[in-house]
Amino acid sequence: MFNRLTLGVAALALAASGALAASDEITIGMALEPPNLDPTGGAAAAIDEVVYANIYEGLTRFAPDGSIVPGLASSWDISEDGTVYTFALREGVTFHDGTAMDAEDVKFSLDRARAEDSTNAQKALFAGIAGVEVVDPLTVKVTLSAPDGAFPFKMAWGDAVIVAPESIESAATAPVGTGPFTFTKWLQGDSVEIARNDAYWGEAPALARATFKFISDPNAAFAAMMAGDVDAFPNFPAPETLMQFDANPMFTVIVGSTEGETILSINNKSGPLADVKVRKAIAHAINRQEIIDGAMHGYGTPIGTHFAPHNPDYLDLTGQSAHDPDMAMALLAEAGQTDLKLRLALPPPAYARRGGEIVAAQLRKVGIETEISNLEWAQWLEQVFKGKDFDLTIVSHTEPADINIYARPDYYFQYDNPKFQALMEELGVTSNPEQRTALLHTAQQIIADDYVNGFLFQLAKTGVANSKIEGLWENAPTQANDLTGVRWTD
């Protein structure tokens, strides 16, 4: 590891390189490369981290504080019965290929997302849409099958961005959106480059160019920041080095919260894991704080259900699955599973790879052996997320307020509880805040009682940046590296 002398020399090198760098260009570090660049056709968070608010925009969008603000829709009206949303679109918006963005594109995007053959990873967001009507080029009417006060929130997701029929076929490799930046180049295995859109309908960004550099190895990420090869790393993969950056005035360490519930996902239909006693045993074998300390160097908040602790409707259920190896072994004996062997598939992020080794050791102490397989992101998506060919995996679900995934029996962890599904349907048509809180508390309790997954911790957002950069998000209300407000200071 670098000593203080090395750190000081590297900081001087960074200062020199920073002085030569263009004040309107930036290089952003990312631990994972996206498998494609189409947020409407892929589940990987890394897609949105490149394109959300930069290349693609939706009717609404997330602000840095998590609030929902207008996007391509300047405003919207809601019918008295709450089932019809009429969106007024902004004038003069064009896609990067010069074609106009209008109500026909909105209809195309929403109808495509909710179609029977849709490959949208969050198709459930659009399930309540009964019809989409073009009123005129700048007005679109969306009719819902039932009232849904959360509809503007759903339209802010990256999966709900507006695309055009003329360019959607090339979206995976050459995305064409309406955002303040245009796609320019993708060097697969290395980086994606974007450039300022001079025809942007809104306020022009301060940055003329940005490069997203993919660096998965924590040591290489540290070296890249120290050398000035990367200007900012919003989700830094080496938290053990944050103290060194924090002690140096050339850097700013940015610590916030995310929507990322990090879980030990359990295939609820995989042999012995269909037994709630076995899943409960796994939950009690886990020592959350040991995982947070060992894998995340203390950054992270323990969770006992699939809900963000910073959410006002959070219910603290960590005590229900507290670390208790003796209880875990007793439950395994009751279930007749005293010689259990499971497969643990781990995607690339450090929280998964490092956390997986710790989890495997904890399970071994209660008599559960695990066979670890390290998968690349594309492999994980194909084998685990799509193929459901796994016993255990570790992944952080970074989508906002996504407890509704437990109402999807075909989702990758294959939890099927009609009671929970009915509860989510009731939540969807409930607008009263107190009633919604009660329903969300019940939902959190149900999945905790069923020990659907091993709930580990809420992922912290730990970033590092050149201290002359301002405007990066502190918190992550959605999975994004929004560069619209980022600039270099003197």
Image (tube, helix red, strand yellow):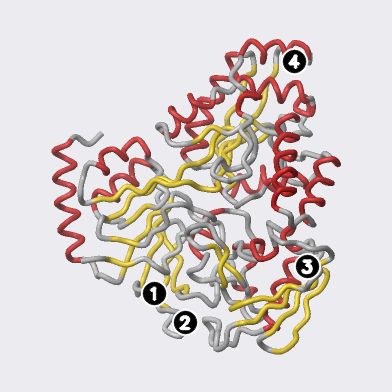
- Cα gap from disc 2 to disc 4, whole angstroms: 61 Å
Q: Quadrant of residue 296?
A: top left
Residue 200's disc is 2
| Depth order, front residue of 229/154 | 154
| Depth order, front residue of 410/134 | 134
| Depth order, front residue of 189/47 | 47
Q: Is residue 167 above or below residue 339?
A: below
Q: Is residue 237 above or below residue 285?
A: below
Point out residue 353 in the picture as x, y percentages from the top left corner. 50, 35
Residue occupying image coordinates x 62% and y 24%: 319
Tell me the mark number nearer the camera, choosing from 3 and 1. 3
Identify the amino acid type marked 3. Answer: Gly
Residue occupying image coordinates x 56% and y 40%: 309
The residue pinned by badge 1 equals 205
Left or right: residue 154 versus residue 183 is right
Identify the amino acid type marked 4. Answer: Gln
The residue pinned by badge 3 equals 82
Q: Secondary structure at mark 2?
A: loop
Residue 464's disc is none
Point out residue 332 in the picture as x, y percentages from the top left corner. 72, 15
Q: Earlier in the sequence, mark 4 or mark 3?
A: 3
